[in-house]
Amino acid sequence: MKGIFTALMCAFDEQGNIHEKGLRQLVRHNIDVSKVDGLYVNGSTGENFLISTENKKRIFEIVKDEAGDQVKLIAQVGSLNIDEAVELAQFATDLGYDSLSAVTPFYYKFDFEEIKDYYNTIINSVDNTMIIYSIPALTGVNMSLEQFGELFENEKIIGVKFTAPDFYLLERLRHAYPEKLIYSGFDEMLLSAAVLNVDGAIGSTFNVNGARARSIFQLAQEGKIEEARELQKVTNDLISGILANGLYQTIKEMLKTQGVEAGVCRKPMKQLSADKVKVAQELAAKFLSK
Ligand SMILES: CC(=O)N[C@H](C=O)[C@@H](O)[C@H](O)[C@H](O)CO
Ligand SMILES: CC(=O)C(=O)O
């Protein structure tokens, strides 16, 4: 379960329905072209919080059907509706997903006891493992070293997807829980996290930049920091361009230049203007090989 995991996008058509052919192409592109180690399905990047339970299940099915056992698969099942989270956890487990993940419950200001109960409720309902998805900038949930430790007491909770710029906490976690899996979540900080010996990374930009991300991670593990830094610089020139133009929309437009029918983002996300589509195409021409 170590290495580079793409936070998989989902292709949607103009009506907001799943574009199955495009989703299958996305899976193939990540496996065959970017050669990533795994896919993180129905995360933020998959627009998970914008879609129905039925669509979430359909995406889990299509991705498993297309990927088979070629790469590791993590199913993000977190939801404010805990019954939905449990239902999805069972569904993905039955399909053969290698692990589950759940975002910390957000919007209401849940206290730690409630967060702990949420994780234990989901994971104790299925025969699978769980990776905590911590992304404080979007959820408002900041957990301490001790609180991560309390969650990790459940042996089925095997790791965390750490999407935060707090390298002090990351180092403390790495040191305190050497046996747990820690995945870096901010692609623009991949090298810095790799230097702290994380086990892998899960990111949205790997949909287009997976090969470079793999190299950064591998070079860092080999101690070739100078080379890794050069690649992180190129990567961050790309990511700066993507973030300035609209994160998920721009990645989808870039994928289209690679022959992947990535579709559009679902409302309330907006569609790119013609000018921005052009910017995305220019980024692809500059940073992606044909
Ligand atoms: C909210 C979101 O998409 N986060 C991703 C992973 O956690 C990242 O891969 C970022 O998209 C990426 O690092 C760009 O900031
Ligand atoms: C990692 C990320 O972007 C996701 O949750 O999909």
Image: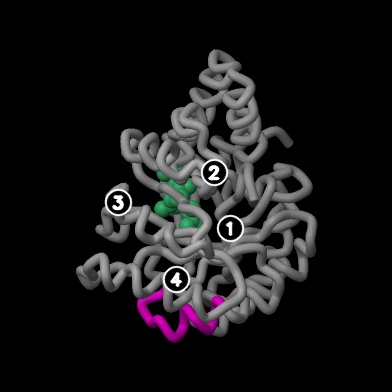
The label number, if any, that marks residue 40 in the structure image: 1
Q: Earlier in the sequence, mark 3 or mark 2?
A: 3
Name the quarter where the C terminus is drawn.
top right
Q: Amino acid at mark 1?
A: Tyr
State whether residue 177 is above or below residue 26: above
Q: Residues within 10 Å of mark 1 (few under 14, many from 20)?
A: many
Circle nearer the viewer, 3 or 2: 3
Name the mark on residue 201.
2
Say if disc 1 is inside 8 Å of ligand 2.
Answer: yes
Residue 179, position as x, y percentages in the image: 53, 46
Numbered range of the magenta stretch: 79-89
Rendering coords of residue 66 (x, y %): 77, 65
Of the pair 281 and 19, the residue shown nearer to us: 19
Mark 4 Cα within 10 Å, few/some/many (few <14, many 20+)?
A: many
* Pointer 1 with pointer 2, Cβ within 8 A: no
Label 1 SS: strand
* Mark 3, residue position: 146
Mark seen at residue 78: 4
Secondary element under disc 3, as helix, strand or loop, is helix
What element does badge 4 sit on? loop
Q: Amino acid at mark 4?
A: Gly
Identity of the amino acid at label 2? Ala
How far is mark 3 from mark 1, CA to CA? 26 Å
Q: Kindly indicate the quadrant of the structure image that contains residue 100.
A: bottom right
Which class describes the residues within 10 Å of circle 2: few (<14), some (14-19), or many (20+)? Answer: many
